[in-house]
Image (cartoon, helix red, strand yellow):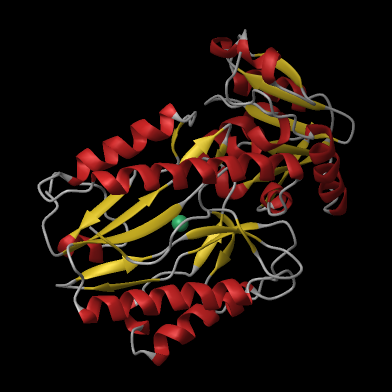
Amino acid sequence: LSGEVRGVEHDHTGRMAALRGALAARGADAFLVAHLPNIFYLCGFAGSAGVLLVTAGEADFFTDARYAIEAPAIVRAARVHIARKGVVAELAARLRRRKQCVAFESAHTIVEQQAQIARAAGRGVRWLPTSGLVEDLRIVKDVAELAVIRAAGDIAVDVFDEVVHLVRPGMRESDLAAEIEYRMKRKGAAGPSFPTIVASGLRSALPHARASEKRLMKNELVVLDLGAILRGYSSDITRTVFVGRAPARIRGWYQAVLEAQRAARVALRAGVTAGKVDEAARRVLRKKRLDRYFVHSTGHGLGIEVHEPPRLGRGVGQKLRLGSVVTIEPGVYVEGTGGIRIEDDFLVCNGEAEILTRGVRELVEL
Ligand SMILES: [Mn+2]
């Protein structure tokens, strides 16, 4: 019934058990999961509405009648309730049964909704705000997740390899973005993991530019940042190409960014802090006096969400864990000239990190 989960058997029972351990450690009797990516991780539900209530012995997923057929077929490790009287009412009816401490996800909860649930659940429920309980579990990917993330990475790389030959002066950025997203879907992706970035010329200096109607021109940088969602998991790569022969200054910048990516890749391993990986990339750019043009973090975790913990940012003391998947994506952005970013996805190992997005990383001149 759901293409999202076809062919992949995730260990939902094991994930629920790990969550129960974290709950017990905090003295909570139950946990209300509101964040859909966390719900997908725990029970496989890939729809757009529902809440999951996890206790020491049970797990109950509440959703509405639109999912009456689909939810029972795809949800694992939880009982499905189609809430005909409304999710809040049925959830509250469940919570009212006993005096208890219920943890909730304060970073993903709408204040108004939480107030409604609390009112309906009554005074017997003590609410415990928490953050990152499920995200902490998601930081370490299991074998099933890695298989899907690898395949999502292959789609992104294959699509780049195809569309790079289509780049022509006169083409609109949005044409190229449409071509990228179409080809990702033809290769089995559910869609792009974020709106595809095609940013050319002066716009390439905007790290989060969306593809616009601007036409590519000769002697311009073009930044292509793309990722595919496959069975609920994302990839994320960036390549920068030059339309024509790149001048020496641009080549110099490109080599610096590539070297920064390599340095971060060498630093990346289990046990080192995220900040140390960021610093490895930043140091290379500092030596070339380009560090002030590097305006974002070196990378981020990748999985069910395209940006998830850990963040590889300046001064982040969090230690990287074996089995995390992260991007490394240094860049330089020079107002009035253009920008360069090179991004790949890596699996954190005990030794050298494994690259999940193969392909050519040298400057492509078209
Ligand atoms: Mn990224």
- In the rendered structure, the answer to whether residue 242 lies left or right of residue 295 reads left
Q: Is residue 320 left or right of residue 66?
A: right
- The answer to whether any part of residue 201 appears in the image is yes
Residue at 26 percent of width and 49 percent of height: 210
For the N terminus, the image quarter is top right
**Residue 244 coordinates in the image, percent (x, y):** 17, 63
Q: Residue at x 81, y 37 (%)?
A: 16
Residue 68 in the image: state x and y as whole percent: 62, 9
**Where residue 235 appears, x then y in whole percent?**
51, 47
Of 208 and 363, nearer the camera is 363
Name the residue rendered at 83%, 45% in the picture. Answer: 18
Residue 278 visible, this orientation:
no
Quarter of the figure that contains the C terminus: bottom left
> Can you tell which quarter of the image residue 194 is in?
top left
The quarter of the image that holds ligand 1 is: bottom left
Q: Residue at x 47, y 40 (%)?
A: 228
Is 216 situated above or below 329? above
Q: Nearer the viewer, residue 14 or 226?
A: 226
Give left or right: position of 188 versus 171: right
- Total labels: the figure holds 0
Q: Name the residue nearer the viewer: 105 or 119.
A: 105
Left or right: 160 as drawn, with respect to 175: right
Rendered location of residue 243, percent (x, y) = 19, 60
